[in-house]
Image: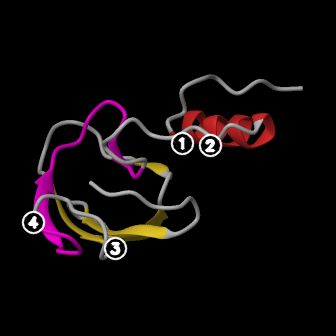
């Protein structure tokens, strides 16, 4: 929960997948990221550290440690906020943001040519 500005850091993520090196990532407000992790087997361990004005349920700026299950898509980290997220009004910026989100989720097959 929280409101931010695109391009400003929102969340630090550390994910420990079974038998692999830890994944470290910093996400900005408005980012969506997918980390490959298939369903079945052991859970991943995660530490999620929100920026000070964001709350993952433990209080503003407080880290959350949890276990994550894999899935068909993997682990999706969505930093667009809980309230209806704001889509930019400027057409070029709106297309750019929508493209980032669909690319991050691999929502459409890539066209060649």
Q: Are marks 2 and 3 in contact (CB under 8 Å)?
A: no
Residue, disc 2: 100
- Residue 108 lies in magenta, yes or no? no
In the picture shown, does residue 49 fall above or below 42?
Answer: below
Query: How far apart are the alpha carbons under marks 2 and 1?
Result: 6 Å
Residue 52: x percent and y percent? Answer: 30, 76
Q: Residue at 64% x, 41% y: name it.
A: 88
Residues at badges 2 and 1 in contact (C-beta under 8 Å)?
A: yes
> Which residue is located at x 44 percent, y 40 percent?
85
Q: Nearer the viewer, mark 3 or mark 1?
A: 3
Pointer 3: what residue? Answer: 51
- Near mark 4 (Cα within 10 A), the count class, few <14, some 14-19 or many ≥20, is few
Query: Can residue 78 be found in the magenta stretch?
Result: yes
Q: Measured from the top left, where is residue 27 in percent x and y?
A: 46, 64
Checking the image for residue 104, the label placed there is 1
Residue 92 occupies which quadrant of the picture? top right
Q: Real-space Cα distance between discs 2 and 4?
A: 29 Å
Neighbour tally class for label 3: few under 14, some 14-19, many 20 plus, Cα within 10 Å: many
The residue range painted magenta reads 59-79
Q: Are marks 3 and 1 in contact (CB under 8 Å)?
A: no
Residue matched to label 4: 58
* Residue 1 position within the rendered picture, expressed as x and y whole percent measured from the top left: 26, 54
Q: Nearer the viewer, residue 110 or 61?
A: 61
Please state, as top left, top right, bottom left or bottom right, where the C terminus lies in the image: top right
Query: Residue at position x 54%, y 26% from top?
Result: 107
């Amino acid at each position: 929960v929280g409101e931010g500005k695109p391009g400003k850091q929102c969340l630090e993520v550390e994910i420990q997948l079974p038998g692999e090196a830890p994944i470290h990532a910093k996400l900005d407000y408005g980012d969506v990221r997918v980390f490959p992790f298939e369903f079945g087997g052991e859970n991943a361990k995660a530490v999620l550290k929100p920026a000070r004005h964001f709350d993952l349920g433990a209080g503003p700026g407080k880290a959350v440690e949890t276990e994550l299950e894999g899935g068909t898509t993997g682990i999706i980290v969505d930093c667009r906020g809980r309230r209806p997220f704001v889509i930019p009004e400027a057409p070029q910026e709106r297309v750019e943001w929508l493209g980032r989100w669909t690319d991050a989720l691999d929502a459409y097959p890539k066209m060649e040519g």
